Amino acid sequence: MTAMSELAAPLPTRPLYEGGPLVSSVAWGMWRFAGDDLAAAAARVTAALDAGVTLFDTADIYGPDNGEAFGAAEALLGRVLAADASLAPRMQIATKGGIVPGTPYDSSGAYIAFAINASLRRLGVEHVALWQIHRPDMLTHPAETARALADAHAAGKIGAIGVSNFTPAQVEALAAHLPLPLVSTQPEFSALAVEPLFNGVLDQAMAKGLTVLAWSPLGQGRLGNPTDDRAHAVAKALDAKAAEAEVSRAAAAYSWIMAHPARPIPIVGTQTPARIAEIPDAYRPRWTRAEWYAVLQTAMGESLP
């Protein structure tokens, strides 16, 4: 393969983890899943399913950020699922817990058990495919956290265990006490947030077979609406690929993430059904090594050695 050869394209589906359920290689995120309009909420969920998305990522903290109650996004999804029994069998739900307003983090055994049960109750389900610790709690020994997670797994409440915003060392500490594999890690990763390429997160994922769920793949909206020179430069680099593939800049941004050999799953956060319908466009751009590295070096603001 030369620098001009195209990198291998990701497959539209993949196992969530080794031996796990088959899921879409792009997820739909529910951070901004809000409101009281059940029909509108159902339309967004249906749009994602119709676009081929089967992995839905939510969290118990998704609510306060939208001016709503703790757990509001999970509760809204629960209402959608209760209204249409055909939807739940078509999706795999991943949720998160451990952020407590005013604390701010709690991964104690008692709280983990409480949080999992509360999420299941709000969602109206008996089981989720993946439960993730949302942020590390420095005041709980990982052995205590691991026991609570293992108990929930043994009870059939969670299909697998993952983490979000953990360092590689924190991943290792938790994994050392779990009697079952840790299957996923969720860092912020985009063409503007490139730290996982250098801080060991993606390297560890490939070494341990962890699924990478990339949150904020549009750089917290900065790629859609650049406001500084760096974001403008990266957006321009992505636009070149987008024009070539006849897709949006967002689709090019998702495809840049998926081109990495760790095969990260971008979590698409748009809440607009028309834009959700464009998710399959992310599979259209094809990157050469030179093009992919050009975006990275633009993000870095310097050349690689």
Image (tube, helix red, strand yellow):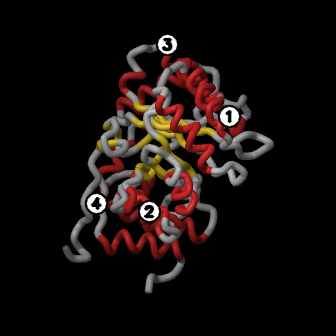
Sequence order check, earlier mark of 2 and 3: 3
> Mark 4 = which residue?
286
Sequence order check, earlier mark of 2 and 4: 2
Quadrant into which the N terminus falls:
bottom left
Q: CA distance from mark 3 to mark 4?
A: 40 Å
Question: Of discs 4 and 1, which sits in the foreground?
Answer: 1
When the figure is inspected, residue 205 is found, relative to residue 112, above or below; the finding is: below
When the figure is inspected, residue 284 is found, relative to residue 71, above or below; the finding is: below
Which residue is outermost to the right? 102
- Point out residue 9 in the picture as x, y percentages from the top left corner: 26, 56
Q: Residue at x 31, y 50 (%)?
A: 283
Q: CA distance from mark 2 to mark 4?
A: 25 Å
Which mark, by number, is residue 110? 1
Q: CA distance from mark 1 to mark 2?
A: 29 Å
Mark 1: secondary structure: helix
Tell me how many marks there are.
4
Which residue is outermost to the bottom? 305
